[in-house]
Amino acid sequence: MKKISLFILVFIFSVISKAQQPVIVSPQWLNENLKDPSLVILYTGFVIRDDYDKEHIEGSRFLWPEWLAFNKPEGNMFAPDPETATRVLQDLGINKDSKIVICHRGADVTIAARMFMTLEHFGLNGKVSFLSGGMEAWKRAGFPVTDKPAVFKKGNIVLKEEGALVNKQYVLNALSTTDKVVVDARMKRWYDGDPTGNPRDGHISGALNIPYPDMIDSTNSFKPVSILEKNFTTVVPDRMKEVVVYCFIGQTACVDYVVGRDLGYKMKVYEGSMQEWSRDAKLPMEKLKKE
């Protein structure tokens, strides 16, 4: 009986593992899977619809970032409620069985990463991938683009929050636990305490530093996995620990989020980030001492 139970567990784990999409994919991977009827490419970035109309990967659908990360008087980069997000994705033809690939243009890696994280926040963990290098990598690989709009029907997906985005109380609690680590994804100069324009400079007390630019090469592609692993494991060697990342407004930290997910870490993003934290004098901050 025990052997049979073990066999069933192994089988279930195998099925679940196979169902998981790779987090970071190459143009070659996307080309090989392009004819999959459940595959949906979302073209996104700081671009307008006219840019999409001129050229995109066949079948791509235009995702305006502010549909899923908008600004309001209280701050920048807020996720919508599940009902609003559901309408956005249904209007993009996303179904319950869809496999999504995020594709950016040019240097728009950080906002595309925010879209990736937001989709996982709304329950699509394991169903969304990030095309490393975006449109430019696709074209460099010799694959075609088109100006023909995608044709699709309204989708049937229904979203709910799964908690990839967390608030300041979650971060504060994480600082006093042993199973979580808080990471600042900004450049080291901002982490150290150079002026940023925020009410307070420096970093969240106890936070470590994994600068997001160290993840991206000159072609706006993710660096080789050996380098990504070194960047992460040097700072957080224990992959069993949950990593809570933040930045200025909860955008660039999403690059660390994507990489961490690809490496097998449990990842969260602090939505308010330094825009919120630096304005609350009760929350702890520190600077590195200058030599």
Image (cartoon, grey):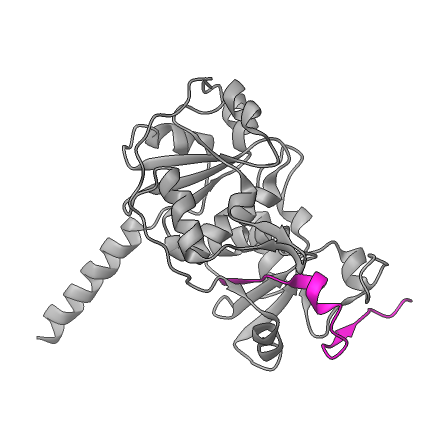
Picture residue at 72% right of the left edge, 74% below the top: 205
Give the vertical position of 266 relative to 105 (above or below): below
Q: Residue furthest left?
A: 1
Picture residue at 49% right of the left edge, 52% below the top: 118
Task: Report the front residue among 244 and 16.
Answer: 244
Look at the image and say whether residue 174 sits in the magenta stretch: no
Which residues lie in the magenta part?
Answer: 266-291
Instruction: Tell me, yes or no, if residue 24 can be seen here.
Output: yes
Give x and y (percent) for residue 94: 34, 41
Quadrant showing the N terminus? bottom left
Picture residue at 76% right of the left edge, 73% below the top: 285
Q: Left or right: where does residue 251 sit relative to residue 61? A: right
Give x and y (percent) for residue 184: 67, 62
- Residue 2 occupies quadrant: bottom left
Give x and y (percent) for residue 85: 43, 50
Give the vertical position of 217 relative to 244 (above or below): above
Q: Left or right: where does residue 83 sit relative to residue 191? A: left
Give x and y (percent) for residue 76: 65, 54
Quadrant showing the C terminus? bottom right
Q: How many marks?
A: 0
Look at the image and say whether residue 270 sits in the magenta stretch: yes
Q: Residue furthest right?
A: 291
- Residue 4 occupies quadrant: bottom left
Give the vertical position of 212 relative to 33 (above or below): below
Instruction: Tell me, yes or no, if residue 225 can be seen here.
Output: no
Picture residue at 60% right of the left edge, 31% below the top: 47
Give the vertical position of 136 relative to 72 (above or below): above
Q: Residue furthest bottom?
A: 176
